[in-house]
Image (tube, rainbow, N blue to C red):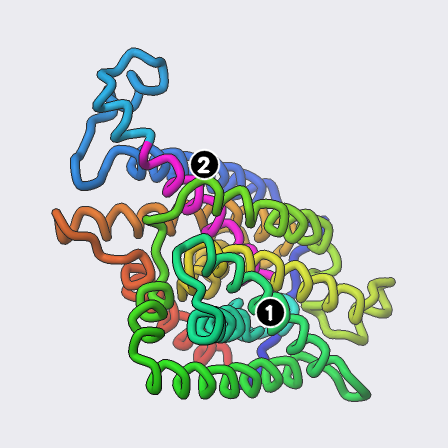
């Protein structure tokens, strides 16, 4: 996979019109996120109204309505956390690898979590959302760290080597998963539900279990913006500007690994959020990674929650899992990205 250098950020010379556009975009992103949160607690097998939700928040609602609305709180909280983690991780991955088609799956995170769950189910009898979460988390972290170790070992390390390391490890792990699931049908039945990715069927315990990993990953991401801006200009130029490319790349990969592992362990491997959101954000606010990270943390949760709402509404009384909906949304985003790359070639 070829790497592509993003256009250098505009830096301190931000124009007044650019600042105004970012301010409008910030207001729009916050408004869409608030709308998505309300929609997430309103829609389901029994649809409630905005007044019902407001009455529940003010403790003035009917007990039955209160129970219905409050049962959607864990799902909404997980949607916010997973969307934030995947979107910020995608932004970091595209910055570190200087590749607009990079996403968290490039680190082998999804394959690592899947292989860990399949192995635990087949050989240790793991079952249920809590069990799978605790097995997915170490598998995702180990896979991410292995890719980083292989991609950065020795001389000649760089984005291309990192991408190749992720592709090789993912191929090996997927071969293991196929071998186990094809020979053990009961493992395949359990695995196929998790691998699509869904927000339902989880409680606040899952949210609280992955929250520390997400918090540490987000804290690291918050300080990487200036370093990623310098890295976008190339390693030599970044070094001449006083930045440490190796340290920035290691920090970005560690942060992306923690964020991706937390999201994947909690809700399964949801595709395209980490790929599509950075492209949407760049179109809104430009290429400054300090701004991109902030907006990704707003747009990612909104996209995932709205996709989950669509999945609940479009096939009532049944549900379409959110991983399927995001794939339908993400595919056009990927095509747009490819067309833009060809246009820039």
At mark 1, the secondary structure is loop
The answer to whether residue 102 shows anywhere in this view is no
Could you tell me which residue is drawn at 83 percent across and 66 percent down? 244
Q: Residue 175 vs residue 314: left or right?
A: right
Could you tell me which residue is drawn at 52 percent across and 81 percent down? 170
Residue 229 is marked as: none
Q: Is residue 307 above or below residue 151?
A: above
Residue 248 lies, in percent from the top left, at: 75, 64
Q: Residue 11 vs residue 19: left or right?
A: right
3D distance between C-alphas at marks 1 and 2 = 26 Å
Name the one closer to the observer, 138 or 287.
138
Instruction: Tell me whether circle 1 and circle 2 mark residues in contact (CB < 8 Å).
Output: no
Q: Is residue 295 above or below residue 124?
A: above
- The rendered magenta stretch, by its main secondary structure, is classed as helix
Q: Residues within 10 Å of mark 1 (few under 14, many from 20)?
A: some
Could you tell me which residue is drawn at 51 percent across and 71 percent down? 116
Q: Which residues are magenta?
A: 71-93
Could you tell me which residue is drawn at 23 percent across and 38 percent down? 43
Residue 54 lies, in percent from the top left, at: 31, 19
Q: Which residue is mark 2?
A: 30
Question: Does the magenta run of residues contain 78?
Answer: yes
Q: Residue 309 vs residue 228: left or right?
A: left
Q: Is residue 198 above or below residue 23?
A: below
Question: Does the magenta run of residues contain 212?
Answer: no
Q: Name which quarter of the figure residue 66 lies in.
A: top left
Q: Is residue 46 above or below residue 278?
A: above
Residue 6 is marked as: 1
């Amino acid at each position: 996979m070829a790497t592509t250098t993003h256009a250098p950020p505009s830096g301190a010379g931000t124009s007044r019109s650019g600042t105004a556009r970012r301010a409008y975009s910030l207001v729009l992103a916050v408004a869409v996120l608030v709308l998505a949160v309300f929609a997430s607690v309103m829609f389901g097998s029994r649809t409630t109204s905005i007044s019902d939700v407001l009455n529940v928040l003010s403790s003035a609602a009917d007990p039955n309505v209160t129970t219905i609305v409050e049962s959607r709180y864990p799902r909404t909280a997980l949607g916010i956390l997973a969307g934030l983690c995947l979107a910020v991780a995608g932004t970091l991955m595209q910055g570190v690898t200087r590749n607009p088609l990079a996403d968290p799956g490039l680190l082998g995170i999804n394959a690592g979590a899947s292989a860990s769950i399949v192995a635990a189910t087949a050989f240790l009898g793991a079952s249920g959302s809590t069990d799978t979460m605790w097995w997915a988390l170490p598998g995702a972290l180990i896979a991410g760290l292995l890719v980083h170790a292989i991609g950065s070992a020795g001389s000649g390390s760089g984005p291309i080597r990192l991408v190749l390391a992720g592709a090789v490890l993912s191929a090996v792990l997927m071969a293991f998963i196929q071998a186990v699931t094809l020979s053990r049908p009961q493992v395949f039945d359990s695995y196929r539900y998790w691998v699509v990715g869904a927000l339902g069927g989880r409680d606040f315990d899952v949210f609280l279990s992955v929250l520390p990993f997400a918090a540490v990953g987000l804290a690291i991401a918050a300080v990487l913006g200036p370093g990623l801006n310098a890295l976008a200009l190339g390693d030599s130029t970044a070094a001449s500007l006083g930045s440490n490319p190796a340290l920035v790349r290691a920090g970005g990969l560690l942060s992306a690994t923690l964020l991706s592992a937390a999201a994947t362990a909690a809700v399964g491997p949801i595709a395209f959020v980490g790929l599509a959101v950075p492209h949407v954000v760049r179109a809104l606010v430009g290429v400054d990674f300090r701004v991109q990270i902030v907006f990704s943390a707003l747009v990612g949760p909104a996209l995932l929650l709205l996709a989950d709402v669509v999945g609940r509404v479009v096939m009532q009384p049944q549900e379409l899992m959110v991983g399927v909906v995001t794939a339908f949304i993400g595919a056009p985003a990927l095509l747009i990205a490819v067309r833009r790359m060809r246009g820039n070639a």
